[in-house]
Image (cartoon, rainbow, N blue to C red):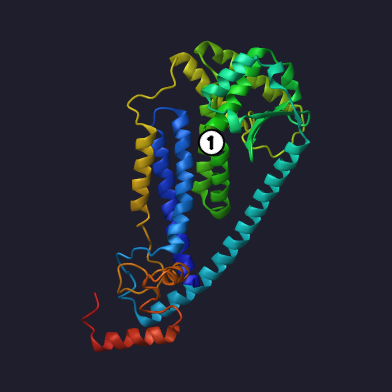
Amino acid sequence: MSSTQFLELVVSLTVQVAIVIIVSHWLGRLVDSERVQSRLWTVCYGILLMLILVSVLLPHPRFFSPWQQMSSDHASTLVSFEMQLGNVLFWIWLGGTILSLAVFLLRAFQVNRFLKSCQPVEITDYVSEETLEELCRRLNLTGKQQVRFLTTDRLSTPFCSQLHYPYIVIPEFLLSFETQKFNFVIRHELEHLQTGHPLQLFLQRLVEVIFWFHPMVWWASQQSALCREFACDEAAIQTPQEIAQYLRTLLTIIEYGATQADETPTPLAFGRGQSIIASRARRLTQIARNHSARKKNSISGGTAAVSLALATLLIALIWLPVDVLASPRANWSPWPTWSADALHDFGVSVHDFEVYNGRMELHELLQQNSTRQIASPDSLR
């Protein structure tokens, strides 16, 4: 991939990603529950990763070429600028991606090491066995997916994780909570696992690593984090009358965390982030007043997911013609070399070269353009 092709790839993908996030957020406001909206964000992150694969492995459309009427001198200047800009952007993106990936792997290593330092806890000593069985049955977390409960005194807020097995880590001070408050915490964390939030968070982190420069990606991360907590808050309370007690439980955990130095990079933490906590409290108060969290005139999660997938097919066609060296003769770009070579190995012949080959010297390309303009000045459109 040349520097001008990389520049075109980054610009086009940046626009596509922004549109997919906007469409996902809009569809999320139409679904019937926060749980469904949270799952829609998981679909969104999966689609964003698929867009990357499509952009680097498949041809992309070229519906128009704005450079055909440009003079040779201007084209030469623009190509030189694009080459330099593409090279600079590549090294900046690569450096940021490597740094983001290193941070991601370091945090994953720290969480894994932290889990190994925690102690198993017999949860039936604090929650009745009937209540636990009912919760696990309702949330379909039995059998091979049986949740493992751990405890530690190095933690100020509960969190869950899922590596080989699902875990819920409970700070020691929570073990002295009364049964109802403790049930709130367990329901909240079980909802994280049931709704697939560890997978969503993993996909989110991958998108953040690749698009670390994209402000819409970080905005989507904030929105999906808020949606995750909303969904788990809904699952933690069974009646509007429990909301006040749930808020007091949340406040107790926050107050304890404010007095402790907790630097553990815990994923899906129960009480992290002041702005998120404030939003959760406001929403729970609103639910208590309206006695309902359901939305009117909503659509199903399947409809939203299908709509997002169909919209993405159209969004993937948005490809900005930034590369001046790209051929104006074809409506679609050639297959990238790596995917074309793989198809050739299976006997499938695909177009894997440019009419104006990127390996051609620039002065030769411009000389051909000038000769064509002199030979047929009226042929240009």
Q: Is residue 279 visible?
A: no
Q: Which residue type carries mark 1?
A: Gly
Indicate left or right for 171 with 229 as reference. right
> What is the quadrant of the C terminus in the image?
bottom left
Q: Residue reaching furthest front?
A: 143
Residue 324 position in % (x across, y down) = 40, 73
Q: Image point 36% across, 72% down: which residue?
A: 349
Q: Image point 40% across, 33% down: which residue?
A: 29
Task: Give the crowd class for mark 1: few <14, some 14-19, many >=20 residues within 10 Å.
Answer: some
Indicate left or right for 225 with 58 as reference. right
Q: Is residue 270 visible?
A: yes
**Can you tell which quarter of the image residue 74 is in?**
bottom left
Residue 10 position in % (x across, y down) = 48, 61
Q: Which residue is mark 1?
A: 196
Indicate left or right for 252 with 72 as reference. right
Q: Image point 46% across, 14% down: which residue?
A: 289
Q: Residue reaching furthest top?
A: 241
Residue 359 position in % (x across, y down) = 46, 81
Indicate left or right for 289 with 374 as reference. right
Q: Image point 41% across, 53% down: which residue?
A: 16
Compared with residue 12, is residue 289 higher up or lower down, i.e. above or below?
above
Q: Give whichever of 338, 100 is nearer the camera.
A: 338
Dot 1 falls on a residue whose secondary structure is loop
